[in-house]
Image (cartoon, grey):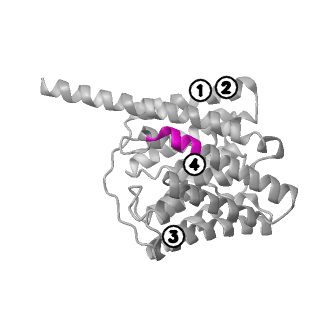
């Protein structure tokens, strides 16, 4: 990306959005205001001049708010274990995206987050709605080309994605560790989906994206631990520094939307998990990236075999 006035405006808009979210959460004392995937959405909808996802403007608030509400209702009403609630949120929203022919996969995170952090407040979906409205408003001012191509995951592929997710969920269930849950934070699940997506070019650079994700978690933990929880400086200042550092990394490694979401996750972490988060992220992202690449290769091989059978 060229560093012209429009690009600088896009960068400024992303930083300002995340800083405002952190400031409102701290001023109101409502952590439910914090929606880490806002970082990913800002990258995909504002920072990139070319469309990243096949989504119409009116679908953005609809999908995000519905997904957030689904996740909250699952968390409030279903008397089942964390693992089943987390998996159910994933499956329902993946089916919703398939039905609406949309590949804006950060929507999945909106449903899974309330289950992960055990949110029970309606402040969360309200916050997601407001954030989504801001997203489409600013998107109008920062023109982005539409992306119309869409290749949905088949039901078979969705089953395979679910099976990949089940493995770490089984580990958390067997160990009864609430800490290990944070190795499967929603932006990492979205990373798996992006790598498994046949339209994605991310699978060509798995190592650089893995390093970018680990760096994002380290930056997020460092600013939250030092600036906010140790020195008691405003949370917004930490996010300002973290988001600027991440955007600088994007200049060198190319943007990857879930990485900016990972930077915001430490704002929601309990103290006993915070120091472990970079390690948890390294392990979790390694698993999801590897499996995403494998599923993509499997999909390519099956499509080639299908075309070969048709020719014969």
Q: Residues within 10 Å of mark 3 (few under 14, many from 20)?
A: many
Percent x, y of residue 218: 69, 47
Of 167 and 243, which appears nearest the observer? 243
In what quadrant of the picture does the N terminus appear? bottom left
Q: Label 4 to label 1, Cα distance in Å?
A: 18 Å
**How many neighbours does mark 4 have within 10 angstroms: few (below 14), some (14-19), or many (20 or more)?**
many
Query: Which disc number belongs to residue 171?
Result: 2
Tell me whether circle 1 and circle 2 mark residues in contact (CB < 8 Å).
yes
- Local secondary structure at mark 3: helix
Q: Which residue does the image show at 39% across and 45% down from the upper left?
A: 201
Left or right of 64? Residue 31 is right
Mark 4 highlights which residue? Answer: 109
The structure residue drawn at horizontal position 46% and vertical position 53%, both measured from the top left corner, is: 104
Label pair 4/2, CB-CB below 8 angstroms: no
| Image vertical order of residue 301 relative to residue 96, above or below | above
Residue ID for mark 3:
10
Give me the disc on residue 251: none
Residue 172 on the magenta segment: no
- As measured in the structure, the alpha-carbon distance from the residue carrying label 4 to the one carrying label 2 is 20 Å
Residue 311: image quadrant is top left
In the rendered view, does 47 fall on the left or right side of 226? left
What label sits on residue 167 in the rendered view?
Answer: 1
For the residues marked 1 and 2, what is the alpha-carbon distance in whole angstroms?
Answer: 7 Å
Identify the mark nearer the N-term, 2 or 3: 3
**Cα gap from disc 3 to disc 4, whole angstroms:** 23 Å
Q: Would you say the magenta stretch is mainly helix, strand or loop?
A: helix
Answer with mark 3 or mark 1, whichever residue precedes in sequence: 3
């Amino acid at each position: 990306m060229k560093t012209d006035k429009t690009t600088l405006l896009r960068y400024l808009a992303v930083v300002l959005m995340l800083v405002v979210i952190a400031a409102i959460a701290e001023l109101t004392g409502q952590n439910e205001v914090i929606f880490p995937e806002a970082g990913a959405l800002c990258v995909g909808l504002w920072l990139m001049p070319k469309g990243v996802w096949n989504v119409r403007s009116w679908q953005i608030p609809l999908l995000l708010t519905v997904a957030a509400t689904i996740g909250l209702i699952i968390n409030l009403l279903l008397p089942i274990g964390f693992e089943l609630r987390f998996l159910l949120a994933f499956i329902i929203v993946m089916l919703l995206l398939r039905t609406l022919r949309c590949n804006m996969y950060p929507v999945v995170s909106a449903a899974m987050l309330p289950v992960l952090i055990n949110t029970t407040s309606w402040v969360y979906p309200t916050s997601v709605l407001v954030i989504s409205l801001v997203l489409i408003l600013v998107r109008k001012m920062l023109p982005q080309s539409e992306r119309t191509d869409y290749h949905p995951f088949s039901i078979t592929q969705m089953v395979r994605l679910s099976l990949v997710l089940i493995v770490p969920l089984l580990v958390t269930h067997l160990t009864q560790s609430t800490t290990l849950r944070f190795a499967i934070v929603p932006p990492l699940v979205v990373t798996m989906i992006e790598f498994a997506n046949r339209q994605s070019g991310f699978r060509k650079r798995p190592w650089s994206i893995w390093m970018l994700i680990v760096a994002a978690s380290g930056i997020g933990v460092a600013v939250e631990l030092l600036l906010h929880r140790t020195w008691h400086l405003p949370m917004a200042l930490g996010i300002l520094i973290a988001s600027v550092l991440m955007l600088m990394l994007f200049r060198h490694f190319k943007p990857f939307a879930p990485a900016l979401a990972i930077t915001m996750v430490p704002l929601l972490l309990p103290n006993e998990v915070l120091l472990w988060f970079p390690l948890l992220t390294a392990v979790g992202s390694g698993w999801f990236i590897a499996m995403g690449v494998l599923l993509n290769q499997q999909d390519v091989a099956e499509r080639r075999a299908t075309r070969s059978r048709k020719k014969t």
